[in-house]
Every structure is written in C-alpha cells, then in structure tokens.
Image (cartoon, helix red, strand yellow):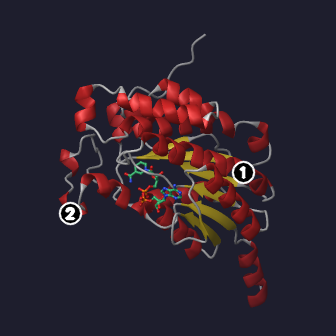
Amino acid sequence: MTEVATRIEEESNMGTYAVTGSASGMGAASAAVLKGEGHTVIGVDLRDADVVADLGTADGRRAAVEEILAISGGRLDGVAAIAGVGPNMPDAAAVLSINYFGPVALLEGLRPALERADAGRAVVIGSNSATTVPLIDEDTVNLALAGDEEAARKRANAAQAEMPAEFAELAPPSISAYASSKFALARWLRRTAVLPEWARRGILLNAIAPGAVLTPLMLGSTGDAAEQDVDEFPTPMPLGEFGRPEDIAYWVHQFLRPEARFTTGAVLYVDGGTDAAMRPDAQPTPMTF
Ligand code: NAI
C-alpha cells in the first residue's frame, strides 16, 4: 500500500467523539486516550473545554447538545458522558440534576448523531455507590426515571433531610442523592440500551461503575493522595490499591471502539473488587416466575 493510501485508510478510521467532564479526572484521561489515537474529541465541561456548558441545568444541556451537533456536523462515532460530581456537594438536588439528568439529556439529545455513524457507541459513568451505599431513595429514583426533574429534585432534598442521624453525622452531605442518582442512571441505561431506537440502530450503550479513583473529585472529600491508606478506606479494596483515572479511561476506550460489538446495557464494575467483596452473591440473581 502506498504511503498516501495508508494515510487515507488511517484517517478514515478516525472518529469524532464527545467527552463530557473533559477538563479533569476520568474525562480528561479518556479524552487524552482518544486524542492520542488521532480522533477528534469535542470536550464538554464547565471550563477549559470546546463546549463550555453547565450540564446541571436544562438550558446548559440544550446548549451543549446544539453546540456538539454544530461542531460535529451532526455525526458522532461515540459519546462518553463522564461529567459528574461527588457526594460532597451540599446541594442534593444539584447532585441529582448533574449526575442523572445531565448524562441522560445529553445521550438522548445526541442519539440521532450516533445513529448517523456506522457503529455509534455511548458510555456513561455511574458508580459502585449505586450498590454499595445503603441509602438509595426509591422515590427519587422513580421520579428521575419518570423524567420529572423538578419533583425528583424536591424529593432528593427531602430524602437527604430524612437521613438517619447516625449516618447524617458521618456521611458526606449528599450521599443519598449521590447514590440514588447513580442507581437511577444504571437503571435508565439498562432500560434504554435495549430499545429499538438504540439497539436496532447499532448504537451500543454501556456503563462503567467506578469505585475509589484518585481524582480531584475523590480527593476533595478524602484529602491528599499521599495520605490515603487503602486498608483504612471505609469500603473494602480487595486489589489493595486505589484506581487511577487511566484505569477508567481504558474501559471507556474499549466500550467506544467500533470493534466492541454484542455488548449493550452492561454495567461494568471497575472498582478494585469493592462491589464483589461487599455483595458477592448479588450477581447473578436467578429469574423468578
Ligand atoms: P473530576 O472532578 O476530576 O471531574 C469531573 C468533571 O466534571 C470536572 O471537570 C467538572 O468540572 C465536570 N463537571 C462537574 N459538574 C459539571 C456540570 N454541571 N456541567 C459540566 N461539567 C461538570 O471527577 P472524576 O472523579 O473524574 O469524576 C468523573 C465521574 O466519575 C463523575 O460522574 C463521578 O460522579 C464519577 N465517579 C467518581 C469516582 C471517584 O472515586 N473519583 C467514583 C465513582 C464515580
């Protein structure tokens, strides 16, 4: 093959990907992997991004979708919805808006652009908190899944206020809203990935559930990286180490590859074994009549 033909073939393999949360942590690491391969990355974040938008508000989400569509020409090979906040943010309603309604609106808004690609891929970042924090508020989850943001926000605040005092004293201020937002996201993902407008259009939609990963988000609540002792961490860490942003970026990249076929609706735990250690028998669950 001539040099030019090789280059054309390589360039034709290059895709266009939207990555939210691109300014920090897992999003920055994922964008770096894609850029390193020569792909075009449209970064979305509150700052230092191609598209600067607040995904915690309906207006911000709308503007982000419009801008991404304009930059990409309406065709995307993949979307990585990574932006999010942790349980340390004091405003429980905002946590729900950013962590649940943000990725859902973005992915639904960009679905038509993914359909225009040959092998559209979407990946979203949940959390193992969805299954390892015993503070899921079912009403918040159900209101979120019903798409009622206003009611879900109200309920998230109320659930936080109702938290048992023994938890409230020790736990981060929005722990219930955080875990509930990530639980709802995983449930939305499994329900949505199999719908014909995704599955039969060749768009694969999967989630990663990270555990403790050394990013500014985690260190904002736990303190300096050097001070972290894996054996003193409140949840078990079987692999004996914390995750790095690159550990998550690796799997984000795998899910976005066109060669990744035949998996959709999956929630992959990338958490050093925490969920397996805490709930060894939770999967598989037998089907019942
Ligand atoms: P990070 O703080 O390093 O990066 C998150 C990025 O999202 C930041 O650049 C931030 O500006 C952006 N962002 C936050 N709110 C936004 C908004 N309203 N609109 C647009 N962008 C916004 O944090 P990290 O750890 O890389 O977090 C990535 C994802 O991983 C989040 O969804 C987080 O909930 C999730 N996660 C993190 C874990 C950890 O231990 N670090 C564990 C489990 C889940």
The image shows residue 117 at horizontal and vertical percentages of 78, 59
The image shows residue 245 at horizontal and vertical percentages of 41, 61
Which quarter holds ligand 1? bottom left
Amino acid type indicated by mark 2 = Ala
Position of the C terminus, as image quadrant, is: top right
Residue at image mark 1: 109
Q: Is residue 45 above or below residue 37?
A: above
For this view, does 208 lie left or right of residue 261?
Answer: left
Q: Residues within 10 Å of mark 2 (few under 14, many from 20)?
A: few
Q: First in sequence: mark 2 or mark 1? A: 1
Q: Residues within 10 Å of mark 1 (few under 14, many from 20)?
A: some
For this view, does 231 lie left or right of residue 140?
Answer: left
Residue lying at the far bottom in this picture: please name it. 3
What number is the disc on residue 226? 2
Q: Splitting the image into 4 quarters, where does residue 135 fall?
A: top left
71 and 55: which is toward the camera: 55
Instruction: Kindly state the secondary structure of the residue where label 1 is placed.
Output: helix
Residue lying at the far top in this picture: please name it. 289
For this view, does 42 lie left or right of residue 116?
Answer: left
Amino acid type indicated by mark 1 = Gly
The image shows residue 156 at horizontal and vertical percentages of 46, 33
Position of the N terminus, as image quadrant, is: bottom right
